[in-house]
Amino acid sequence: MDKLMDSPWFLRLTALVLAVILFVSIQGEEGKINGKSPGDQIDMIADIPVKVYYDNENLIVTGVPETVQMTIEGPANIVETTKLLKDFTLFVDLNELTMGEHRVEIQHENISDKLKVKFEPETIDILIEEKITQTFRVDPELNDRLLKENFYITNMEVEPKVIEVTGAKSVVEAISFVKATVTGEEGINKSFEQKARVRVLDKDLNKLNVVISPEEVTVKVGVSEYHKEVPITLRKIGDPPPGVDVGSLTAAEKIVTLYGPRKVLDEIGELIVDVDVSKVKELGTVDVELKMPIGVSSMSLEKVKVKIEGTVSETETEPDIDVDEDTSPAPDSEDDIASTDVPKPTIETKTFDDIQIAVKGLDTEFTSMFLKPVNGALTLKATADSKIIEKLEKTDFVVYVNAAEIAQEGEQVFSVSVEGPEEVSWELTEDKVTIKIELA
């Protein structure tokens, strides 16, 4: 035995065994210090969905993240299997909680008990609120910059006009705008129809997390070239032929619509039509071509029928003289000439003060108030045959403005139109008025 212990190989073997024991002992202590047993593995699984259990028919829950990050630690084989299969579930159970704010922990199921589990975030702050549904009117919108120059939006219609919004009570009560925006390429010059998604926004134009039904609506957009209705004013030019006395001119159409740039049309208050009475041989109705003003692209009328009234006196023509015959001219004698005095019509003018201006076509959601003239009345001067003037009354005229195209509030300038007897011509003290449009 002494010889064995004195052997160098025995000493070397003993030292090796002690070294191995010391190494294993140190590794075990480090594993205990780090909380990790020998052979354990740590891994992270990202973007794990979180289920929420609550009364979703009557309540709304906010604050629960859609996904979380989970770290698992344990035996390597179990960690790898869990990460590969992902047959576990993460959830928060809120069925026993009341409405209000709560801080809850994420729970899990179907994860091995041999694994240590940690979530990021570890806890979440949630809010449980009453679930409500309200109806809202949808407001369509289109960027005016997409329209072709000199075109504008005449009207926008939405179908359906109202939609249902479901969400938390505090969120639904914060709704300020429900919009359906239509888009398109620049240069829009005709009406169109388009599907548009509904957006629900708060007062700061932030999109709100709600359920919308339906999510899409149909928007019909009316587009028209800028136009303006102006009265037709007839003007006599030239001198009538001998024996013709032109009394009054009356146009069958009182109004013509002009199309073109707004800055051009704003300067036009009436369309003056020249009627050349030097070519009038008989009374009646004639067609007169309308001359398009400079800058106007088109007009609703090319011609207008004008009724010419007055008198025509017949004149005797001298018989043809045969130069081959020996004849002598008969002496002039007043008795030889039959003359007939034809009474000429007497043209008179009559003035009607304080004729009220009617506002036609204004949508019932708006009200109107005259700014100029403040009393909403004008003076009309009528010209016609004296017999017609005698019977003419203020009620024979309708003075109005067409507000059918008004779609927003503000001060608007309108051209004044007049409807009256055909055999009467008239003149207004003002051909434009200013009206303030407000919501009713």
Image: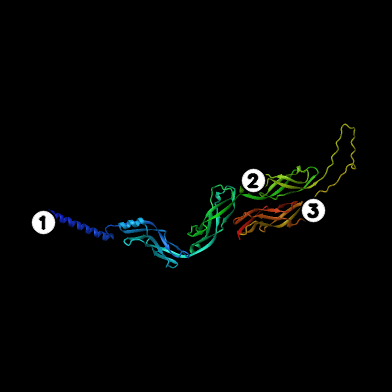
Q: Is residue 56 above or below residue 249?
A: below
Whichever of callouts 3 and 2 sits on the residue coming sooner in the sequence is: 2
In front of the other: 193 or 298: 193
In front of the other: 5 or 147: 5
Spatial separation of the CA atoms under disc 3 and disc 2: 40 Å
Tag in front: 3 or 2: 2
Does the image show residue 296?
A: no
Spatial separation of the CA atoms under disc 1 and disc 3: 160 Å
Q: Is mark 2 in CB contact (under 8 Å) with mark 1?
A: no
Query: In the rendering, at what x and y percent does residue 38 appear?
Result: 26, 58
State the SS at label 2: strand
Q: Residue at x 33, y 59 (%)?
A: 72
Residue at the extreme left of the image, as rendered: 3
Does the image show residue 2?
A: yes
Q: Left of 207 or right of it: where is 230?
A: right
Badge number at residue 387: 3
Spatial separation of the CA atoms under disc 2 and disc 1: 127 Å
State the SS at label 1: helix
Q: Left of 228 or right of it: where is 111?
A: left
Query: In the rendering, at what x and y percent does residue 397 appear?
Result: 72, 55
Q: Is residue 393 above or below residue 149?
A: below
Q: Left of 278 or right of it: where is 219?
A: left
Q: Which residue is mark 2?
A: 298
User: What's the amino acid at mark 3?
Assistant: Lys
Q: Residue at x 54, y 55 (%)?
A: 217
